Amino acid sequence: MIKPKGHMRLFATTSVRQYSPSFSLALIAPLILLLVFSFVYPVGRLLWTSVATPNGVTAEHYLRIWYQPLYLTILGRTIQLAFVVTVTAFLLAFPVAYAMTLVKKRWVAVMTICVLIPLWTSVLVRSYSWIVLLQRNGIVNNLLREIGVVTDPLRMIYTEGSVMVAMTHGLLPFMILPIYSALDTIPPELAKAARNLGAGPVQAFLRITLPLSLPGIYAGSLMTFILALGFYITPALVGGPQTLMMATLIGQQTTDLLNWPFAAALSGVLLAATLLLVAVFRKALALNKGGQFG
């Protein structure tokens, strides 16, 4: 057996525990530097902008958010809409992901492409497509009038419902793929064993398949919820001024009013709310590990 010589011995170990702390730190140093310069420093500078003034530090902008109900209403609407989009995406994504585990491999490839096409399409294109579909003289209204369901066109565009539909469509791949990944790792013999022991199809699904797919459900729900909190283009185009969300409000403060300190305070509040909800989500995940349904 040929033994490695010189510096090659550093990479010849089979366990990370054999590396010295200084060598391990050197290996992850590029990642730490990238994280500091691409995330920690910009976020820290943003938060400092929200409180810094020529005369010192102030909480004026945060107090403005707290005492004016409009901004809390917009924050509540953003969280509520993100929650509804996450639940709707889960209800639509789970049957699709489950069907992908039942069909043959070539059909899995076809279904995966169908799932990924919306993800590869520009958000701007998808938003304008929904405007074309839901506008007063759009395809949906024309179809409803043709089949006699309505006589006058419905008001569907520039409402919270249209924003929810468009956001759900855009975020659906982020829910389908993690759930499919979790379902695909479940051995089918487990459900068959449950059936052989007397469980019905529903009971086998609730006691075997659904609990084992929870990691994928949690991962997909978390990604969908966080992305929905920061959605900007779709609510701005499909929702209009009547459905103002936090990201749209921050965009108005920076591009239209040039009030960067207040926009930074709004960003800080949205960041804090996101971190708080993620912590609550992780706590719920820890409490539900090993949980059963039915």
Image (tube, rainbow, N blue to C red):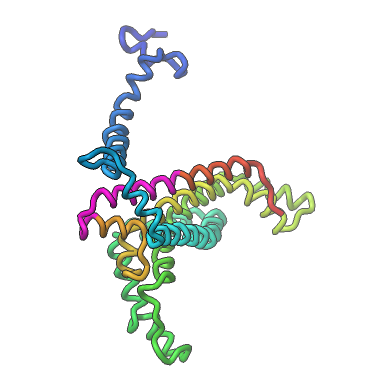
Is 259 in the magenta?
yes
Q: Is residue 132 above or below residue 290?
A: below
Q: Is residue 227 above or below residue 238?
A: above
Q: Quadrant of residue 46?
A: top left
The residue under the point 68% across, 54% down is 206
Q: Is residue 24 above or below residue 137?
A: above
Q: Nearer the viewer, residue 175 or 163?
A: 163
Q: Quadrant of residue 143?
A: bottom left
The magenta span reads: 254-275
Q: Nearer the viewer, residue 202 or 282?
A: 282
The residue under the point 60% across, 45% down is 186
Q: Quadrant of residue 91?
A: bottom right
Is residue 113 shown to the viewer in this render?
no
State how many labels appear: 0
Residue 208: image location, x then y, percent: 67, 49
Is residue 272 shown to the viewer in this render?
yes
Residue 269: image location, x then y, percent: 38, 48
The residue under the point 66% across, 42% down is 290
Q: Nearer the viewer, residue 143 or 136?
A: 136
Q: Residue furthest front?
A: 55
Residue 249: image location, x then y, percent: 31, 59
In the picture, the quarter occupied by the C terminus is bottom right
In the picture, the quarter occupied by the N terminus is top left
